[in-house]
Amino acid sequence: MGQAQLEATNAGIPHTAIQCEHRGSVARRMQCVHCKGITEDVEVDPFICSHCGLNLFVRDHYSRRIAAYQGVCIDAEDPGNVPPSKGIYE
Amino acid sequence: MSGAQKIAVTVTEIVPLNELVTRFKFKPTDGSLLPTFSGGAHTVVEMKDGAITRLNPYSLMSDPMDQTAYTISVRRDDVGRGGSLFLHRNVKVGDQMTISYPVNLFSLDLRAKKHLFLAGGIGITPFIAQIKQLERTNGRWELHYATRSVALGSYVDELTTKHPNEAHIYYDDQEQRIDLKNLLDGQPLGTHVYVCGPKGMIDWVRKTAADEGWPRESIHYEEFLAPKSGKPFEVKLAISNKVIQVGEDESLLEAMEREGVDAPYLCRGGACGQCETDVIDYRGNFIHRDHWLEDADHKSGKKIMPCVSRFEGKTLVLDR
């Protein structure tokens, strides 16, 4: 849905002029802020970046420009100290 | 202290353009560099006119990246309250003045695929800076500029010489009119419209665009209102614990400032929303003139914009 909206805004339609209604999976499209790689269909938090392998925390910060949520390294200060993953909306 | 940060400047050039419009150039008095700005920004110019301090907003029209000087163009308003007359008559090259940091309430939406500028009269000034900004970045734009006559067409020559394909001029006295409906109809998807000019023109553009199905977010407008004179009235300021009189020729905001009350402001023209003030109690009628509050707010009797709006009646108590 976000990617469809991005196509429309790239064509010049303001995002406020597009009506969206969500159905189906609540999995998120995530962008790793460190390597900028996109991991599709993320259902758990934290998760492992499919590009650089960092443990990423699923943030609610959404980018309309990238059509993805932001993933930030969760164990940067204390490598390896990663809480067990659970569903994003649990 | 309310308002944007101040800059001490010296007037370095005054150029009369025609019967009504004069251009002023300001350089920092201490020789430092001015901040860059974005096209559409204005500065508030402080004028010490005898006992009165006038603070009027003017659009910056110099190149936004030029940090050595700012220029503004001022249209003389013979029936206004005197700010433009003061600049035209009293200000000389070499004078030291105070202006504010640039504030932009009319910025370009850089997500636009194309910028369509509609100017009426002195409303051309913000577009001159925006055009300079877009020329640096290869932005796509088009200008339609309505002015009264050839003699009063400020910057027409400069615009049509530099941008023969983008600048379109319409002279009122030759019965030339912007064919707005057709113009809007022919725009590519992703065009943003910007209008600056008299209130009637802004209303016409907003209404025509809305009727043609344009999204509200794609229509940008700016009109600075000058405060209007009116009947004197009395105001009680609850927080400052003062009762003040607003004179015939001053605004409520100016009266508060005269009494030493530090009331917030930025544009002083009913556009920015900075001076919004809660009404605690009133008996009488508001004369709302701002572009900021919604109609429902105007009717509610709970809010007022002291920079341009007035009051007629017995009691007005403000949360200030």
Image: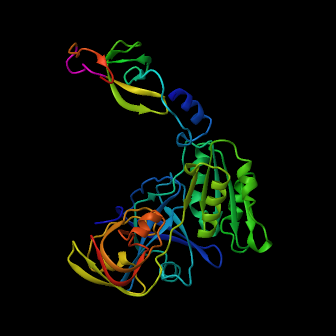
Tell me, yes or no, whether the highlighted magenta stretch contains residue A78: yes
Q: Is residue B154 left or right of residue B106?
A: right
Which residue appears farthest toward the front when viewing the image? A23
**Whole-percent x and y of residue B249?**
43, 85
At 51% from the left edge and 56% from the top edge, which residue is drawn? B106
Instruction: Pick the quarter of the image with the N terminus of chain B.
Output: bottom left
Q: Position of residue B73 (x, y in %)?
A: 56, 69
Within the image, what quadrant is residue B246 found in? bottom left
Residue drawn at x 48%, y 33% is: A64
Q: In the rendered image, is residue B238 in sight?
A: yes
Quarter of image, res B114: top right
Q: Nearer the viewer, residue B176 or B4?
A: B176
B279 vs A29, nearest the viewer: B279
In terms of secondary structure, what is the magenta stretch mainly?
loop
Q: Does residue A45 belong to the magenta stretch?
A: no
The range drawn in magenta is A73-79
Q: According to the image, what is the colour scheme of the structure?
A: rainbow
Q: Is residue B163 left or right of residue B74?
A: right
| Image quarter of the C terminus of chain B | bottom left
> Does B314 appear above or below A23?
below
